[in-house]
Amino acid sequence: MLEIKGLRASVGAKEILTGIDLTVPDGEIHAVMGPNGAGKSTLSYILSGRDGYEVTGGAVSFDGADLLVMAPEARAAAGIFLAFQYPIELPGVGNANFIRTAVNAVRRARGETEMDTVTFLKEARNAVKALAMPDDMLKRNVNVGFSGGEKKRNEILQMTLLKPKLALLDETDSGLDIDALRIVAGGVNAARGPKFSALVITHYQRLLDYITPDRVHVLAAGRIVRSGGPELAVELEQHGYGGLEAA
């Protein structure tokens, strides 16, 4: 699915990623943990094609294609989805229309038939119910007046309807209470399967109590310094990152 070799990247004159090596096979969920400023969000932005980040070395392959030469919209059509740490508000843009437009743009790019309004709304309402979102969520403007938990659930709603091959979840758990955390994790678990992989970026082990990852990677000083099973997240929660950074 995703193979990263020696990825280096900078923002302006500052090097953020100093040689990332990481492989996420089909059907697996991997967690990336690490201290502030380690480069976790930078990694997700580069994989999704966000402007302002310069790749200075290495390679990234997605489903056998060179990801780094693809435009952001081509990456989305290929099956990459990014859930933002801080979802932005879009005044005047209806939530249902926004998501349906995105879904049909991806379907067109793949040569698939576009989803009509009735079919989309039926599927969207089922997803809204599963995520315990208010009934009027689809009628409101994107993220306008949403609570922090509603914004994060709206990201998972988009993921559910877009059906990506690879979801990049950038600290989706930040700002969530226990109930919202369970609901968001449930949305990710519902997507699990042989054709879905995810890179879950988080500071805390608590999210991984609900989304059991296949692998956990520790990112520090711009590179992966340790990898292991789910037990690694428990160890980090108990002992912190200090020893790993020093090593």
Image (spheres, rainbow, N blue to C red):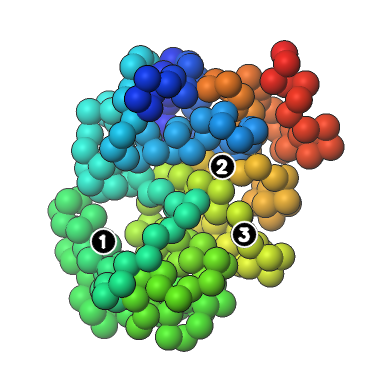
> What kind of element bears circle 2?
strand
Q: Is residue 47 left or right of residue 243?
A: left
Q: Label 1 crowding class (10 Å Cα cut-off): few <14, some 14-19, many 20+?
A: some
Is residue 186 positioned above or below 166 on the image? below
Label whose residue precedes the other's in the sequence (1 or 2): 1
Judge depth for marks 3 and 2 and give the one in front.
3
Taking the view exactly as shown, the residue that stands out farthest to the bottom is 135
Q: Which residue is mark 3?
A: 175
Give residue 150's position: percent from left, percent from top.
52, 70
User: Residue 79's mark?
Assistant: none
Q: Is residue 162 above or below residue 133?
A: above
Q: Amino acid at mark 2?
A: Ile
Q: Position of residue 13 (x, y in %)?
A: 37, 20
Residue at 42%, 44% in the rendered image: 166
C-alpha gap between disc 1 and disc 3: 26 Å
The residue labelled by disc 1 is 102
Quadrant of the snapshot with the N terminus: top left
